[in-house]
């Protein structure tokens, strides 16, 4: 009688573990699908934003090429001189620094 009860208990545990595995794997799979769809949506939105930004840049460049050159130089300065261990070796007369001495870039 005791052996029969142990066998039934083991069978119920096995069925419970099987259900646990099914539920867990379905939840894991659903999570992966949801994350992938969210990433795809984020990439689409980011791409549209970048396209709009590029359109604005193109219009700005067409209207005022000098301002656009100045703006791009400011972006280059921002990217080049980050906090931390930044080393930058170039001639002070380089075109890279043309807006440092004269805001008109001359």
Image (cartoon, rainbow, N blue to C red):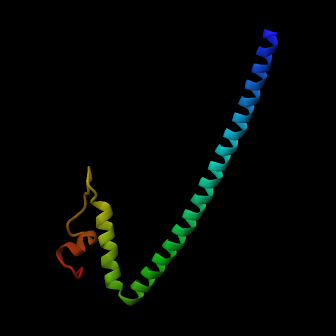
- The quadrant in which the C terminus is found is bottom left
Residue 31 vs 54, above or below: the answer is above
- Residue found farthest to the front: 1
Quadrant in the picture for residue 37: bottom right
- Residue found farthest to the top: 2
Residue 100 vs 27, above or below: the answer is below
- Percent position (x, y) of residue 67? 31, 83
Quadrant in the picture for residue 64: bottom left
Q: Is residue 6 left or right of residue 64?
A: right
- Percent position (x, y) of residue 89? 25, 57
State the residue at coordinates (21%, 79%). Answer: 103
Quadrant in the picture for residue 25: top right
Counting labels gives 0
State the residue at coordinates (30%, 61%). Answer: 80
- Closest to the observer: 82 or 90? 82
- Percent position (x, y) of residue 5? 78, 15
- Percent position (x, y) of residue 54? 47, 77
State the residue at coordinates (32%, 84%). Answer: 66
- The quadrant in which the N terminus is found is top right
State the residue at coordinates (28%, 57%). Answer: 82
- Closest to the observer: 97 or 46? 46
- Residue found farthest to the left: 101
Q: Is residue 66 left or right of residue 35?
A: left
Residue 40 vs 28, above or below: the answer is below
């Amino acid at each position: 009688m005791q052996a029969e009860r142990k066998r039934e208990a083991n069978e119920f545990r096995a069925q419970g573990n099987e259900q646990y595995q099914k539920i867990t794997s379905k939840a894991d799979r659903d999570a992966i699908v949801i994350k992938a769809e969210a990433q795809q949506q984020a990439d689409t939105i980011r791409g549209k934003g970048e396209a709009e930004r590029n359109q604005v840049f193109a219009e700005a460049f067409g209207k005022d090429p000098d301002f656009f050159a100045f703006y791009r130089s400011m972006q280059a300065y921002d990217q080049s001189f980050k906090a931390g261990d930044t080393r930058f070796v170039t001639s002070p007369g380089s075109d890279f620094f043309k807006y440092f001495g004269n805001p008109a870039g001359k």
